[in-house]
Amino acid sequence: MMFAAALVASLQLTFFPHGHAGAARVWTLHCGPAGGTHPHPALACTELLAHPEVFARQPVCTLMLTRTTPYARIAGTFRGRRVLREINAPCSPKQWRALHVLITGAS
């Protein structure tokens, strides 16, 4: 008997490559199995599953960001839990690098 794979993530990713000064890129991403409109869903899911701490409570960023600071918003469900997270390079440099494909869609 075959069982369907459990859906690990169902997310909407919004990437602002030029901050509020430019247009956003919006994708969906499903993990378990990988799919959605993200340019590289399998790679993005691999990154996300390797770094689930992205949805842990984060310290408040006190850096002064500009209108052109790139950032990403991740919203949806992850492992059955509702999630919402904004990430930018100045405040979360390790996560920005570790989740590069997930955030930017580049491989």
Image (cartoon, helix red, strand yellow):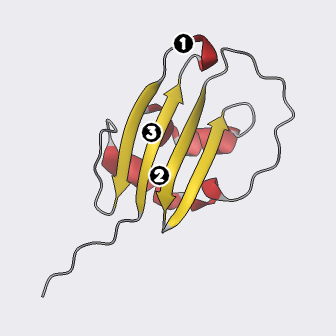
Toward the right, the furthest residue is 62
- Tag shown at residue 101: 3
Real-space Cα separation, disc 1 to disc 3, in angstroms: 20 Å
Separation (CA) of disc 2 from disc 3: 8 Å
Residue, x 41% and y 65% (percent of image)?
8
Q: Position of residue 23 (x, y in %)?
A: 49, 16
Q: Amino acid at mark 3?
A: Val
Mark 2: few, some, or many residues within 10 Å (few <14, many ≥20)?
some
Residue at the spot of label 1 = 22
Q: Residue at x 56, y 45 (%)?
A: 98
N-terminal of the two: label 2 or label 1? 1
Mark sitting earlier along the chain (1/3):
1
Q: Is residue 48 left or right of residue 85?
A: left
Q: Is residue 66 found left or right of 37 in the rendered image?
A: right
Q: Residue beneath label 2, please?
A: 47
Judging depth in this view, the residue of 97 and 14 nearest the camera is 14
At label 2, which amino acid type do we have? Answer: Glu
Disc 3 is placed on an element classified as: helix
